[in-house]
């Protein structure tokens, strides 16, 4: 049991270290030696758990896809209006990207892999379709909040999510969800408050 517990802790340390490495450098730029050093382990210890960089990446993308399906399932709730469900799914994705480094790594890796193959990530297509369906339903119920074209909204919200993600410095990820919500209000609800600037995200003046 002691040996199994130690192996499990090592496995978790490696996943955390790999998540940070993939988010920082992407799949191509990631270095297994740095992953081992970040986890305070030898490269041999890393290979005892993951024999390749691809297997290490898969150990992050597979849970990401499962978690994303759980988040997306909230769009099917019947106790909330379509507009509320749309906001819930958007906030859930932004919040998870902000707070969960492994989820962020899965998002990053899935996006990078899809781009390399000239296609949209599966989760991005699912998200866009979810937004399209909810926005259309909200519009039919008079809850469109100024949205004239649900398909346009789905594409725009996806662009906003990616745009904020890739322009937010690592030091500002604790404000990622706030930035997405601020931009969402600007575009859809005509919010008056400007979204935080990049220097503000890092606490600079």
Image (tube, grey):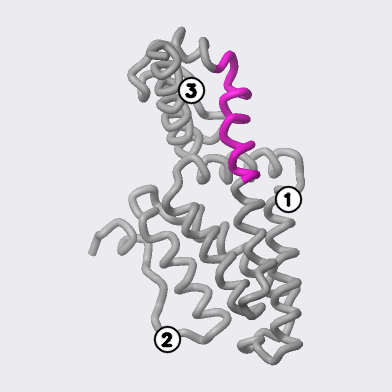
- State the image coordinates of residue 79 (x, y, percent, origin top left): 62, 76
Which mark is first along the chain, 1 or 3?
Answer: 3
Left or right of residue 204: residue 78: right
- Helix or strand or loop: what does disc 1 sit on? loop
State the extent of the magenta-drawn residues as a range: 50-66
Which corner quadrant of the image does residue 90 belong to? Answer: bottom right
- Helix or strand or loop: what does disc 3 sit on? loop
Name which residue lies at 45% across and 15% down: 4
Label 2 close to label 3 by CB (< 8 Å):
no
Q: Which residue is mark 2?
A: 192
Residue at the top extreme, as displayed: 44
State the separation of the CA atoms marked 2 and 3.
44 Å
Q: Which residue is mark 3?
A: 31
State the separation of the CA atoms marked 1 and 2.
32 Å
Which mark is first along the chain, 3 or 2?
Answer: 3
Which mark is first along the chain, 2 or 1?
Answer: 1
- Helix or strand or loop: what does disc 2 sit on? loop
Q: Camera-side residue: 124 or 142?
A: 142
Q: Which residue is mark 1?
A: 120
- State the image coordinates of residue 56 (x, y, percent, origin top left): 56, 25
Left or right of residue 128: residue 174: left
Name which residue lies at 39% across and 17% down: 6
């Amino acid at each position: 049991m002691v040996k199994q517990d130690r192996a499990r802790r090592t496995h978790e340390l490696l996943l955390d270290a790999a998540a940070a490495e993939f988010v920082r450098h992407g799949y191509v730029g990631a270095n297994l030696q740095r992953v081992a050093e970040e986890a305070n382990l030898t490269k041999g210890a890393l290979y005892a758990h993951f024999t390749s960089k691809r297997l290490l990446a898969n150990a992050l993308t597979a849970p990401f896809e499962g978690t994303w399906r759980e988040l997306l399932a909230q769009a099917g709730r019947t106790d909330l209006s379509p507009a509320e469900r749309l906001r819930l799914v958007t906030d859930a994705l932004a919040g998870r990207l902000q707070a969960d480094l492994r989820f962020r790594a899965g998002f990053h890796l899935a996006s990078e892999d899809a781009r390399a193959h000239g296609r949209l990530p599966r989760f991005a297509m699912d998200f866009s379709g979810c937004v399209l369906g909810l926005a259309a339903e909200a519009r039919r119920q008079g809850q469109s909040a100024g949205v004239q074209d649900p398909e346009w909204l789905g594409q725009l919200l996806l662009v906003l999510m990616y745009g904020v993600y890739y322009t937010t410095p690592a030091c500002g990820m604790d404000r990622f969800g706030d930035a997405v919500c601020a931009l969402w209000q600007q575009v859809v609800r005509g919010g008056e408050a400007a979204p935080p600037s990049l220097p503000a995200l890092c606490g600079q003046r």
